[in-house]
Structures are given as structure tokens and as C-alpha cells.
């Protein structure tokens, strides 16, 4: 049973979100709108009437008849290191113990996620739940999946069986705007964050090398070039810069300084496609120059890791790369060089003082658990998911088990124990959160997006500050929730299938010098002949609808 201190913390979160629990009314559009009546949650708040369920802790277990829920979901290198599947983590074991629901995860091979998803969809053999993120979503969009009869519209299921999830959506118009599709569907259960998170990913540098050479922190691309050249010539770095295999770092953090996205983005409400714009060519020309001069990892195109290998960057092989804050302390411990020192770099720009419109706050609704037409025991599954939005469930998701993975301090705030911060089994902070708390996946409420910062060393905390200060307002990024309609999604997928392959292959050839920039105009014209203007029109329509929501 959740403690009173934990419950008080959850109530504070609800108030922060603007949730008022009580009778619900309908606004002029027919959407639920909470009346200004606040009901204090207590430990005995149980769901007593399925016709009018109230937010709070459900009666456990969710089911006395054991059921298994199959979930297709991506995994990652850190997860693979600690458990064969997410089902094997201590978090999911505890969740099953409480709820009576067993989860069987189906993980596609790393690097083959989209191919695996396509094969599963074409087979007609679906799991109970698909976990979708921006990169791995139903072809044609979630509305298309609902029209195809693969994904369930859950609006009515939320009303009937998910009072905690419903309260979150009813309380926050912006959150609701990001989750409900243009066709009015709730396509699934999202990972919801109470706040926008601090920056957790960006460029890092061998600060000890920088200081040893008497160089200043690089800010512009020209600064980066000079530093990378010095690292190669004076430090013998085999890969002065580690680059992601596409030539573009995730989240546009390397190319944003050129004011251009690697794919679709917007300028003053007008959708653009990166490869058609001058900044894209400039960016590739820069990388081509750096590659020719040996300033980029010569094998970058063959590497599949989202984050570079520990054994590579914890040695003297690399000078600048892109990493996560939670790993900075780990790399320092792994390094055999006693002088090894890392520091974060601001996101690079063309001219000092430039603003980065492509890097912003992101969204508070991320991973989506979409129920499929193959889902059995739908009402029980929805109740089970809703538990992870409840006071008790969201604490398990966010912090684990009280007095095991966290305690409540004198100020009423949860603090991780050494099981998380100094794990006796050698798990790093991120791995410990994966093992004991629901740090990844859909269908949950995270009470503190930045909770892992409790375990950051000074360098990591400084990295958060540097990246936060150098990111922009995200005004040029397309909202994740600006979705295509089912029909648009089908057409868009057909148009973009060949374009994406052609752009990806040609982009790498231009960086590697296998294709001449003298042919760049032909590259652009080929993209246009393949129908990119129609794809832009479709994206524009989705953005316009989102802005009108």
C-alpha cells in the first residue's frame, strides 16, 4: 500500500498539472472538463463504480485470473546488458506481483526495428500491444492503424476503465492536444512526463586534451575544426570526432547550427525538407572536408550504436562525441588514464550567438502503447495500464519500491538509495533505473523527468546546464503530434519510401566522397521528381491542423 507521504507527493504533482478530481462536466465541444471541485485522495480511494470510475489507487491485484500481455517494444544496449527482456527486470517482476498481470516482451533485433515491425504487421500475427515512438510508428500513422483494424481506438475504454489517465488528459489542454489525433482518436497510452526534461544528450569533449593544448572551448563549426585538427595531429586521435552512422546525430544536435533539419522541419509555419535546402548541402560539405582530413571516425557509417562504445571513447581514440549525461561519470571510471576528464560542449553554431530553433524542450508525451485487435482481456489490460498512472503505480514507475530503491526525506521528497546510486552489482545509474523503475516504455506517468540527476557527478550536472543554455526554443521542429490522417499517411509512406532510401544512400556517398558535390543539383532534382513536393504538402496539412486544435 502506498504510504501517506508518497500519496502527498502525488497530490502535489496532480496540483502541479492542474488536475482537479471530482465531478466531470462536458464543454461545448463535448470533451470532458473537470469542474472546480477538488477531492483529496486517500489510501482508501478505490474504484468502486465502473460506470463512474474515480482517479486513485485501484484494488489490487487487478486480476485474480493470471493473464499474459504480449508487447512488441524496442530495446537498447543498456537494457540488453542487464536483462534478456524487459520482463526480466525487477520493475516488471514487482509490477506483476502487485497486479497479477504477466508481461511478455517481444524485442526486435537492435538496428532492425522498422524492418521487424513491418514484417510483423504484414504477417497479421499481432501482439496485444505495440509500443510506438516517433521513429518506429505504424506506417501511415496511428489513425491509419485504427482504420486498418490493427490498432484499437481507446477513447471509450479510457472513459470506462482508466480514470487516472483520463484525469491527466482532462486536466491539461496542451497534453490532450499532443495525444488525441486529428480524427479525435486516443490511439493509445503514452508515457507522460509532469514537466519538460532537462537536456540529457549532447556533445562532450576530452577536456584534459583541450586544456593540455591550451585551446578554448569550441563554439562554432570553425572552432570545432581547429580543435579536431589539433586532436588528430597532437594527440594522435584515431577518431577525433565520433559521428552517427547516418551522418546526422539524433535530434538534429549537430546540424541545427545550419538552420536545417535532416528531414522535415518548419520555418514560420511553413514545412521544409532538409535535403532541398542550402544549409543541408553546406553541412554535408563540412563533413566531407572533415572526413577527407581524417577528423571523423573512418568507420562511422558501419557502426549501429546510438551511443558510442565505452571501450572506444574511454580511451585515447576519440576527442569529441555525443553522449548522455548519465554516462559521463561511468566513462570517467572506465578510463585507465588518470588525467581523463570530460566536459560538455554547447551545441555548435555557424556564428557565435546564433539561436538553434531545431533544438527545444520536446514533448511531455513520448512512448505510446497501442492496443491491437489481437488484445485479449481488453478491460483488464486497460485497468492494468491505468495502475501506472495512479498514485501508487506512478511512484513504482518513477522511483521503484519505497525503502528499497528510495526513501522519503524530511522535506517529503523521494531520494534514491545506494541500490540505484551506487549499485552493488555494478549497474550504472541508467541501468539501475531500467532494472528497478519503469524508466522506458509507454503506459505510465513519470513524476520527475529529471530524477536521475540525484546521482550525477559535477561534470554531468554541468553538462545539463551547458546543453540547457545552448538549446533553442524548438520553434523550427515539427510537433510530434502533428499527425497525418489515415489516407494521407498511406500516400505519404508510398511517396517517401524510395525518397528516404535514396537520400540516406546519397547523403553518405557525399560525406564519404563517393559522390561529387558537382552533382548536388541533380540530387535535389531527383528528389523532386520522386514526389517530395506532395510529401511536403501532406506534412503542411498536418501541421496546419495541429495548429488549429
Image: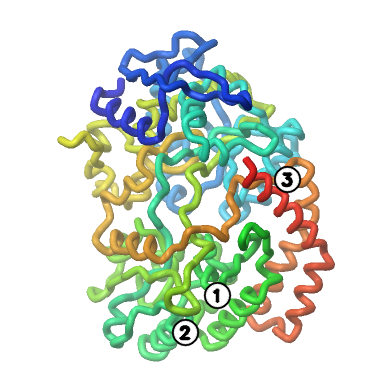
Is 399 located above or below residue 377 in the figure?
A: below
Residue, disc 1: 299
Q: Residues within 10 Å of mark 3 (few under 14, many from 20)?
A: many
Is 115 located above or below residue 44 in the figure?
A: below
Residue, disc 3: 140
Front of the two marks 2 and 1: 2
* Residue 110 placement (x, y as % from top left): 56, 53
Q: Which mark is residue 226?
A: none
Residue, disc 2: 222
Task: Please say whether residue 301 is visible from this viewpoint.
Answer: yes
Secondary element at tag 3 = loop
Q: State left or right for residue 189 relative to residue 62.
A: right
Distance between the alpha carbons at the discs numbered 1 and 3: 34 Å
Going from N to C along the chain, the mark reached first, 2 or 1, is 2
* Residue 354 placement (x, y as % from top left): 47, 73
Residue in view at x 61 percent, y 61 percent: 268
- Picture quadrant of residue 397: top left
* Residue 363 placement (x, y as % from top left): 50, 47
Q: Which colour scheme appears in the figure?
A: rainbow
Q: Residues within 10 Å of mark 1 (few under 14, many from 20)?
A: few
Residue farthest toward the left in the current orientation of the protein: 410
Q: Are marks 1 and 3 in contact (CB under 8 Å)?
A: no
Residue in view at x 69 percent, y 41 percent: 120
Distance between the alpha carbons at the discs numbered 2 and 1: 23 Å
Residue in view at x 35 percent, y 65 percent: 466
Going from N to C along the chain, the mark reached first, 3 or 2, is 3
Front of the two marks 3 and 2: 2
Is 506 located above or below residue 420 in the figure?
A: below
Going from N to C along the chain, the mark reached first, 1 or 3, is 3
Q: State left or right for residue 67 relative to residue 202.
A: right
Q: Nearer the viewer, residue 215 or 234?
A: 215
- Picture quadrant of residue 498: bottom right
Amino acid at each position: 500500500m502506498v504510504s501517506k507521504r508518497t500519496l502527498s507527493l502525488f497530490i502535489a504533482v496532480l496540483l502541479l498539472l492542474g488536475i482537479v478530481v471530482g465531478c466531470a462536466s462536458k464543454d461545448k465541444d463535448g470533451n470532458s472538463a473537470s469542474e472546480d471541485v477538488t477531492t483529496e485522495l486517500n489510501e482508501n480511494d478505490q474504484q468502486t463504480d465502473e460506470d463512474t470510475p474515480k482517479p486513485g489507487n485501484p484494488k489490487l491485484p487487478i486480476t485474480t485470473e493470471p493473464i499474459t500481455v504480449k508487447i512488441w517494444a524496442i530495446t537498447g544496449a543498456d537494457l540488453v546488458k542487464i536483462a534478456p527482456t524487459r520482463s526480466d527486470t525487477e520493475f516488471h517482476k514487482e509490477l506483476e506481483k502487485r497486479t497479477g498481470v504477466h508481461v511478455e516482451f517481444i524485442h526486435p533485433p537492435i538496428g532492425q526495428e522498422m524492418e521487424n515491425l513491418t514484417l510483423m504487421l504484414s504477417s497479421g500475427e499481432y501482439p496485444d500491444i505495440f509500443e510506438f515512438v516517433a521513429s518506429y510508428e505504424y506506417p501511415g500513422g496511428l489513425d491509419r492503424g485504427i482504420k486498418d483494424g490493427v490498432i484499437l481506438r481507446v477513447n471509450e475504454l479510457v472513459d470506462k476503465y482508466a480514470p487516472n489517465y483520463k484525469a491527466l488528459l482532462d486536466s491539461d489542454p496542451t497534453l490532450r492536444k499532443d495525444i488525441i489525433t486529428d480524427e479525435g482518436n486516443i490511439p493509445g497510452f503514452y508515457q507522460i512526463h509532469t514537466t519538460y526534461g532537462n537536456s540529457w544528450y549532447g556533445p562532450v569533449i576530452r577536456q584534459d586534451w583541450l586544456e593540455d593544448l591550451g585551446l578554448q572551448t569550441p563554439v562554432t563549426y570553425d572552432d570545432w575544426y581547429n580543435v579536431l585538427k589539433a586532436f588528430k595531429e597532437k594527440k594522435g586521435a584515431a577518431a577525433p570526432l565520433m559521428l552517427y552512422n547516418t551522418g546526422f546525430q539524433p535530434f538534429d544536435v549537430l546540424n541545427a547550427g545550419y538552420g536545417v533539419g535532416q528531414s522535415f522541419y518548419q520555418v514560420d509555419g511553413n514545412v521544409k525538407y532538409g535535403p532541398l535546402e542550402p544549409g543541408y548541402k553546406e553541412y554535408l560539405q563540412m563533413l566531407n572536408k572533415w572526413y577527407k582530413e581524417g577528423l571523423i571516425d573512418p568507420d562511422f557509417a558501419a557502426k549501429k550504436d546510438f551511443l558510442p562504445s565505452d571501450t572506444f571513447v574511454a580511451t585515447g581514440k576519440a576527442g569529441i562525441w555525443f553522449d548522455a549525461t548519465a554516462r559521463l561519470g561511468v566513462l570517467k571510471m572506465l578510463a585507465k588514464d588518470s588525467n581523463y576528464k570530460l566536459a560538455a560542449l554547447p551545441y555548435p553554431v555557424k556564428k557565435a550567438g546564433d539561436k538553434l530553433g531545431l533544438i527545444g524542450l520536446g514533448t511531455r508525451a513520448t512512448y505510446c502503447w497501442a492496443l491491437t485487435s489481437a488484445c485479449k482481456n481488453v478491460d483488464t489490460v486497460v485497468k492494468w495500464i491505468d495502475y501506472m498512472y495512479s498514485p501508487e503505480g506512478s511512484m513504482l514507475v518513477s522511483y521503484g519500491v519505497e525503502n528499497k530503491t528510495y526513501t522519503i526525506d524530511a522535506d517529503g521528497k523521494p531520494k534514491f538509495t545506494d541500490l540505484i546510486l551506487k549499485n552493488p552489482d555494478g549497474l550504472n545509474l541508467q541501468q539501475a533505473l531500467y532494472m528497478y523503475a519503469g524508466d522506458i516504455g509507454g503506459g505510465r506517468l513519470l513524476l520527475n523527468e529529471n530524477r536521475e540527476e540525484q546521482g550525477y557527478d559535477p561534470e554531468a550536472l554541468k553538462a545539463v546546464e551547458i546543453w540547457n543554455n545552448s538549446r533553442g526554443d524548438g520553434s523550427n521542429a515539427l510537433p510530434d503530434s502533428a499527425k497525418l490522417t489515415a489516407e494521407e499517411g498511406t500516400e505519404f509512406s508510398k511517396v517517401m519510401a524510395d525518397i528516404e532510401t535514396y537520400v540516406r544512400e546519397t547523403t553518405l556517398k557525399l560525406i564519404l566522397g563517393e559522390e561529387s558535390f558537382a552533382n548536388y543539383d541533380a540530387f535535389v532534382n531527383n528528389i523532386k521528381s520522386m514526389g517530395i513536393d506532395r510529401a511536403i504538402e501532406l506534412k503542411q496539412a498536418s501541421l496546419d491542423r495541429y495548429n488549429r486544435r
